[in-house]
Each structure stands twice: as structure tokens, then as C-alpha cells.
Amino acid sequence: MRIRSVILGPRTRLGLELAHELPGPPAERLLIARDASDAAFLDRLGTGATVVTIGEPLPRLPPQGDPVAIYICALGPVHAGDADLAAHAAAALRDLGLVRELLAQVRDRAFHVVHVSSVLARVGPRPSRCYYAGFKNLVEGILTDLVAAHAGGRLSVVHPGRLRASRSALRPLSLLETSYRGLARRLIRIASRERARRITVGIDARLLTLVRSATETWRALVTY
């Protein structure tokens, strides 16, 4: 089996776009569905990729071969605001266990993990979004340790702002945001490079980072 790309969270809008944009034949892709419903949906699409549901045995990948890109589009809470610690912690531990298993299989070859986080994990979020941002940072920290245990591994983390299906001059604010297709293409470019990166994507995300940084600096100056 010649797997070059793995997508965790392929049912998400970003995951679907990524599966569509990936270069190479579909047979070189492994899509990790989070449950049976996601797996059935992916099978109906007829992507030609190998689909495995979390909890099922992973296909055995050759210990050596071409570099592998592992795209993590969903791990932990997918949307801000839906706090359910027990469910999210259990799902995150399950998904991280699968990532650990994947990394064990590709430990003798070069691999690049590209994790899609959120700009909220980089700035001081509003109280209503602290739970979501905190989970993103927690997952990133664990992934950092998992990848660091393998000499040939790299971890890139992408912090996007708001994602849209499309951008249009008829909706001026959408021009500050990022399309799912645009982000998918950016992820593919990141995975193809040897250097790991931690970047903020989207004009809105960069503006938010700048404003929050300036606000915190001003607070520090007037408080102390």
C-alpha cells in the first residue's frame, strides 16, 4: 500500500476540500472517519481513497517509503461554544491514540503533520470561547510531544481566522477571511516543505492578533 496522505476529519468542510485538492491518485490517500456515519458518507462520495473509521484496525503501511503528510482537520471541539468536557476529552484521547498509532507506523520515514488549530488559540479569546481555545492549545501541546519523539517528523500548526465557502466583492468582509479551498491549498504547500511552521492565516486573523496584542500591551502599561 502506497499511502502518501492521511486526513483526520475528512467529513469537515475543510477535510472534503483537502481530499479534492490533494495531488496524486486517490489510492494514495487514507481518510480517517470519526464514526460510522462519516464513513458511510465518504463511501457514498466514491473518492477512491481508503476509508477507515476510528476504532477499526488501520491498514499496515510499509515501514519505509515516500514521505507521508498527515492532515488533522478535526481533533477535539470543532465549533466554538459547544462545551462538553467529558465527550470532547474522550474523543480527543481517542483521536490522539490513533495519531500515535499512525506515527508508530511511519517512524522510519519522513512525515509531516499539519494541524489546523484556530487564531483563538493564539490570542486572548472572549470568555465564551476560552474553552474552545484552551482545547486547541492542549491538543497542540500533546501533538508537539508525539511528533518530537520521532526524528523524521515535523509538526506545522496553522491558525486560521473565519473560514468561508467562497469570497466575493459583494460581501466585502469576506475578502478579509479565508476560503476552505484556499486554506486546503495552503496546507498542501506547507506539507510539501521540509521546514515546520506555525502560522496565522487570513487577514482577519492577523488583524485580530495585532489588535489583541496592542490591547494587552496598553493594559500592561496602564496597570503597572
Image (spheres, rainbow, N blue to C red):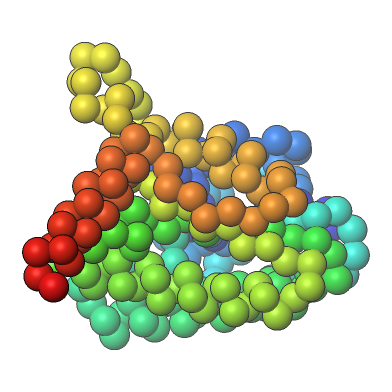
What residue sits 86% from the left and 71% below the top? Answer: 108
Q: Is residue 208 left or right of residue 136?
A: left
Q: Nearer the viewer, residue 219 or 133?
A: 219
Q: Quadrant of the C terminus?
A: bottom left
What residue sits 23% from the left and 72% below the top? Answer: 131
Using the rendered view, name the quadrant where residue 192 is placed. top right
Q: Nearer the viewer, residue 18 or 145?
A: 145
Q: Is residue 107 left or right of residue 196?
A: right
In the rendering, at what x and y percent does residue 35 appear? 45, 67
In the rendering, at what x and y percent does residue 114 appear? 58, 56
What residue sits 69% from the left and 52% below the top? Answer: 195
In the rendering, at what x and y percent does residue 165 appear? 35, 32
Name the residue at the left extreme. 222
Q: Is residue 202 visible?
A: yes
Rendered view: 176 above or below 58:
above
In the rendering, at what x and y percent does residue 129 appear? 19, 64
Q: Is residue 126 visible?
A: no
Using the rendered view, name the quadrant where residue 87 is placed. bottom left
